[in-house]
Image (spheres, grey):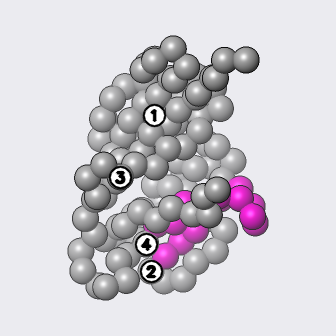
């Protein structure tokens, strides 16, 4: 359903250093890109996350209400991603915890202020 999501950055090298380390934790890596945009994923045909310098040449700005949710695979995985992001310089937006009976999540802002959620969701059945 989702092909890719882009997050803006004012410093592509700094953003790539952050996402190279963070997304390696979930088995993703930088797949391809150009000078102003880099795509991360697990493989061809899978959803991807891209970091990019805005095409219009203006400064990056975060969209209010925009967020990228990255599956942690387990509660422990959510905890690891959250701690790794914090160690890499992210800003806390909500420590790991149960948000509702089926949802465990943690929230951070990356180095450019983009909001990320690390989560595990268990639906009944």
Which is nearer the N-term, disc 2 or disc 3?
2
Q: Which residue is mark 1?
A: 82
**In the figure, residue 52 lies in which quadrant?**
bottom left
Q: Nearer the viewer, residue 48 or 124?
A: 124
Q: Which residue is mark 3?
A: 66
* Disc 2/disc 3 C-alpha distance (Å): 21 Å
Mark 2 = which residue? 36
Residue that label 4 marks:
52
Q: Residues within 10 Å of mark 3 (few under 14, many from 20)?
A: few
Q: Nearer the viewer, mark 3 or mark 1?
A: 3
Mark nearest the camera among 2 and 3 is 3
Q: Is there a contact, CB below 8 Å, between mark 2 and mark 4?
A: yes
**Side (left or right) of 43 relative to 16:** right
Instruction: Give the side of residue 103 with respect to residue 64, left or right.
Output: right
Task: Specify whether 18 is left or right of 74.
Answer: left
Looking at the image, do the residues carrying marks 3 and 1 touch, with CB atoms under 8 Å apart? no
Residue 38 covered by magenta stretch: yes
Q: Residue 74 at x, y = what percent?
A: 63, 26
Circle nearer the N terminus (3, 1): 3
**Mark nearer the N terminus (2 vs 4):** 2
Asked whether residue 10 is drawn in magenta, I would say no
Alpha-carbon span between mark 4 and mark 3:
16 Å
Q: Is residue 77 above or below residue 19?
A: above
């Amino acid at each position: 359903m989702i092909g890719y999501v882009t997050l803006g950055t004012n410093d592509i090298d700094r953003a790539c250093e952050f996402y190279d380390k963070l997304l390696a934790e979930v088995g993703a890596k930088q797949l391809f890109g150009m000078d102003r945009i880099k795509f991360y994923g697990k493989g061809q045909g899978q959803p991807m996350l891209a970091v990019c310098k805005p095409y219009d040449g203006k400064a990056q700005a975060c969209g209010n209400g925009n967020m990228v949710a990255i599956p942690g695979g387990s509660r422990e995985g959510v905890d690891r991603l959250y701690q790794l992001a914090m160690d890499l310089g992210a800003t806390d937006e909500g420590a790991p915890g149960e948000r509702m009976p089926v949802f465990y999540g943690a929230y951070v802002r990356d180095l450019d202020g983009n909001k990320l959620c690390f989560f595990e969701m268990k639906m009944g059945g």
